[in-house]
Image: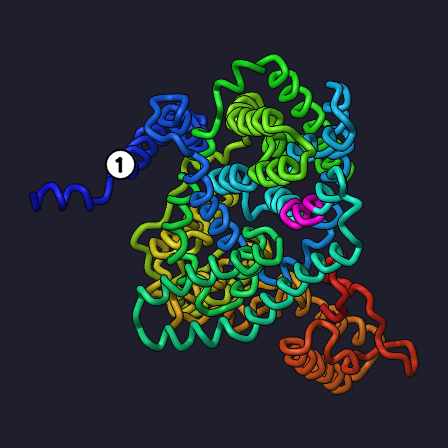
Amino acid sequence: MAAESHASHAVDLAPFVILLGSAVIAVPLFKRLGVGSVLGYLAAGLVIGPFGFGFFTEPAQILHVAELGVVMFLFIVGLEMQPSRLWSMRKDIFGLGLTQVGVCMFLLAWVGIALGYSPATALIAGTGFVLTSTAIVMQMLHERGDLAKPRGQKMVSVLLFEDLAIVPLLALVAFLAPGAGEVSITERLTGVAIGTGCIIGLVVAGRYLLNPIFRVLAAARAREVMTAAALLVVLGAAWWMQLGGLSTAMGAFLAGVLLSESSYRHELEADVEPFRGILLGLFFLAVGMSLDITVVMNNWQLIVISVVAFTILKAGGVYGVARLFKADHREALERTVLMTQGGEFAFVLYAAALGVGLITLEGNAMLTAIIIVSMLMTPLFVLIHDRLMPENKVDASGVETPHDARGTALLIGFGRFGQVVSQPLLARGYTITTIDNDPEMIRVAGQFGFKVWYGDGQRLDILHAAGAHHASLVLVCIDDQAAATKIVELVRHEFPNALLLARAYDRDHGLQLVKAGVDYPVRETFESAIKFARAALDRLGEPEAAIDDAIEEVRRRDEERFALQLTGGMMAGRELMIGNGGSEKPKDVAGPDTTPDESAVGG
């Protein structure tokens, strides 16, 4: 009797075993076939779902829970996006993103109109397909190592805009609905105000509360509490944004951005990452389960026509906009292949349209099937693209990766800057371990008597193998701003006792590096410009003492201005610049060693 009672109250573990078992079998198999993990998850979901072996009959319930995987993924992406970096992406988010969404909405609406649907229904049906799958694109960018690259950042910008766009698109559904006139302007403005208030509230809480809270929790030295706090931040931010009618993923992303400059950033990422991976895999399984084979079989001609038409038109729109925004053919084609599917936000949009009578129950089922089929097709499109246009692979033959290296200094990046840096140190007899990710340069350096290891300084395992934990000094000499900042953050977090010097691309990058923990940033053009100016004054016949005084004054003013900019922003300390405009203050224009987007002068 007791055994029967215990059995009746025992947790049914079979669903968990089936979910995990199907993923464990399918994903390695599909990756071995070269088609990626996403298609493996989708196929496994189809097999174990209600239209496969029928182990699960309510995939929608799993999908709701699994969407937390997308939420956590966006939180981790947010941790990589410092506010300054996000600000630098504003043109891509609101320029590229808005243009792509607008053009694709216009093009895809004609599919429904051509099939005989009303303009309002056709617009909503097409718009659902415009919203790209954040989960699929982000996972594929992650697997391809493109997430931090400029081409990947362009796609992330579009995805961020689409996340923002879900709110006005839901308002559009309400506006187009039968009887929409009954909703007053006041009610709509109230909805916008609530959403805006939620964003402001989250930003204020993140700016003034999160770091102090994590400081207190870290002092308690309870790792499990820090993990719980990390999950609380992610889910709390998502829930707060949901209350305001906004995207949960956007809430998690904003929370990540607000913590991106926190000293607890790497620990938070490590705490959330396991949950993100499992839940994101579960999301793809649930999408595969949700494909209603009966609807597909009964309406297969309409679904095939719609998938083909939506895909071709969206591909044309994405490619055209990419080329309009100066992407080359290869980058535009890759973006097209990755972003031609519909996404998970389409389910939200179609559910809202069903609720207000814009689409029928059967129409919702067909549109959902169209989106899922497009999601299933994306990994296949990517596979075909990669076979026809393979990435130019780096020939790393004849170069060695670091192993058990020990040196007084670890030098990362042996280009024209790093080569000069190495000379005085070597002249004084210090041992240097050097790594670089350019095999051709490594081979050439070998011909000149240098030992340079092959490796990416952004990888922690490479840093350990190169002896970063033994080095007294770490020198970051690469010319990639984003990579240099990431290396600085990683070294400061993992090897806090090492002295850390870094090459800064310009003044703004130097400020970023100091905030990331570098001990001494060197702006790559500053010293050469000072030497150039000294030579100019000398040629003009200035006395040596006067030249020394002028150079010393410029250095003093520059140091004071840099210190002010660390807390006051790029425009702080403008009065310290020596201008040639009389009594006028220096104008807010780009300086000679800044990027076009920066409103700063003085290098």
Q: Which residue is mark 1?
A: 17
| Quadrant in which residue 369 is drawn | top right
**In the rendered structure, which segment of residues is drawn in magenta?**
162-170
How many C-alpha atoms fall within 10 Å of the one at disc 1: few (<14), some, or many (≥20)?
few
Quadrant of the rendering where the C terminus is positioned:
bottom right
- Residue 67, relative to residue 341: is it above or below? below
Q: Is residue 424 magenta?
A: no
Q: Is residue 166 magenta?
A: yes
Q: Position of residue 254 (x, y in %)?
A: 57, 59
| Quadrant in which residue 416 is drawn | bottom right
Q: Position of residue 197 (x, y in %)?
A: 66, 65
The kind of residue on which mark 1 rests is Val
Depth check: 123 or 258 in front? 123
Q: Position of residue 114 (x, y in %)?
A: 76, 19
Tell me which residue sits at (48%, 63%) in the image.
489
Colouring scheme, one of rainbow, by chain, secondary structure, one colour? rainbow
Depth check: 158 or 52 in front? 52
Tell me which residue sits at (47%, 63%) in the image.
233
Tell me which residue sits at (35%, 77%) in the image.
219
Q: Is residue 363 left or right of residue 603?
A: left
Q: Is residue 268 left or right of residue 562?
A: left
Quadrant of the rendering where the N terminus is positioned:
top left
- Residue 245, relative to residue 522: is it above or below? above
Depth check: 555 or 504 in front? 504
Instruction: Mark yes or no: residue 478 visible.
Output: no
Instruction: Mark yes or no: residue 113 visible.
Output: yes
- How many numbered marks have been drawn onto this rendered protein structure? 1
For mark 1, give the secondary structure. Answer: helix
